[in-house]
Amino acid sequence: MASYTLSQITAELGGEWRGDDIAVTAVRPLADAQADHISFLANPKYKAEVTDSQAGAVIVSAKSADEFAGRSLIVAADPYLYFAKVARLFSPVVKAAGGVHPTAVIEPSAIVPSSCEIGANVYIGANTVLGERCRILANSVVQHDCTLGDETVLHPNAVVYYGCTLGKRVEIHSGAVIGADGFGLAFAGDSWFKIPQTGAVTLGDDVEIGSNTNIDRGAMSDTTVGNGTKIDNQIQIGHNCKIGSHTVIAAKTGISGSVTIGNYCIIGGGVGTVGHIEIADKTNIGGGTCLTHSITEPGQHIAGIFPDMPYKEWVRNGVHIRHLNEMNKRIKQLEKMLGTDAPSHNDSEN
């Protein structure tokens, strides 16, 4: 079991340790932590939990540190980010073992460095090129004419269609499909004619794709995802989309074809968009929002049951929506008092 003292952690990650230089073996939530664990306080409203916690050490901000004198602490500018880095110390990235499983099939024209780990029943197609230290795990498929950067990982049962390009340190989780045909159809009067999808998919460096997510290939040019973007599970990215760098998209979101999304956007779960719109940099879209037109001003917060409503306006209107029936009754009473009754409607229509 790995163990680090607070001085070792701060020497590696920065920050300041206070109190006893204890050794910790894992990161745990405040409520579950024991004497050999380290926890964190990111939200001041949970300060009482620090007092009650059995954690041997706690990561706190400089603003909160003085309130916990006598405890072993690590003081960090961003306790949540620091916690993530400590967690990585205890759970390091798995490195490629090197070698090819006897059941894997690698076409003769593919280039697979000896530093790569190729698992059971993997298929790697013709003219595909893998970078150093890639991990292609059991039952995964990389079709022909693909390029994968160094240290890319395909978890079991991931599929990369032909002609796709993945950058360095890309991680594709199980069941994800990169480069399936985009949904392009032309109506021929009595049937649908499928438009050949001759583009591919290009993923930048440090992109992560969640399980059972689909990114469709472009109709003519590539569907692209920028460096550092993280895409959650069960997401559909339509053909010809252009997603910027360091954007995050939460589960069950559907991005229609030819949507352009900027850099550093945050898109909540269950969001849906129409096609052919643009979303500016640093846009924050709340979960469940239906986006029907472009967001051209950077830094907007969009949310709500009504399409594209700015977050502050949605919050204000949400207060009134809860009281619509009461407001309706009061309006009817006022209309009667003023002798201006509105035409009657059935309750089912109100």
Image: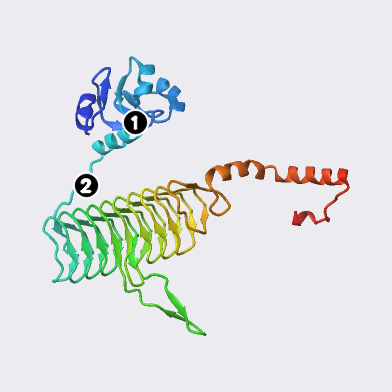
Visible in this render: residue 126? yes
User: Considering depth in this image, is 71 or 222 the residue closer to the camera?
Assistant: 222
How many angstroms separate mark 2 from mark 1 (CA)?
A: 25 Å
Residue located at (88% from left, 47% from top): 339
Mark 2 vs mark 1, foreground winner is: 1
Query: Any mark on residue 57, and which?
Result: none
Label 2 sits on what residue type? Answer: Val
Say left or right for 217 vs 146: right
Q: Residue furthest left?
A: 114
User: Considering depth in this image, is 1 or 159 the residue closer to the camera?
Assistant: 159
User: Considering depth in this image, is 90 or 17 the residue closer to the camera?
Assistant: 17
Q: Are marks 2 and 1 in contact (CB under 8 Å)?
A: no
* Position in image of residue 103 (x %, y %): 19, 65
Q: Which residue is mark 1?
A: 79
User: Considering depth in this image, is 223 or 179 the residue closer to the camera?
Assistant: 223
Query: How dense is the environment of label 2, judged by Cα within 10 Å: few (below 14), some, or many (20 and up)?
Result: few
Visible in this render: residue 54? no
Residue located at (25% from left, 36% from top): 90
Residue located at (17% from left, 64% from top): 129
Q: Which residue is mark 2?
A: 94
Say left or right for 267 vs 146: right
Query: How dense is the environment of label 1, judged by Cα within 10 Å: few (below 14), some, or many (20 and up)?
Result: many
Q: Quadrant location of the N terminus? A: top left
Secondary structure beneath label 2: loop
* Position in image of residue 295 (x %, y %): 47, 54
Label 1 sits on what residue type? Answer: Pro
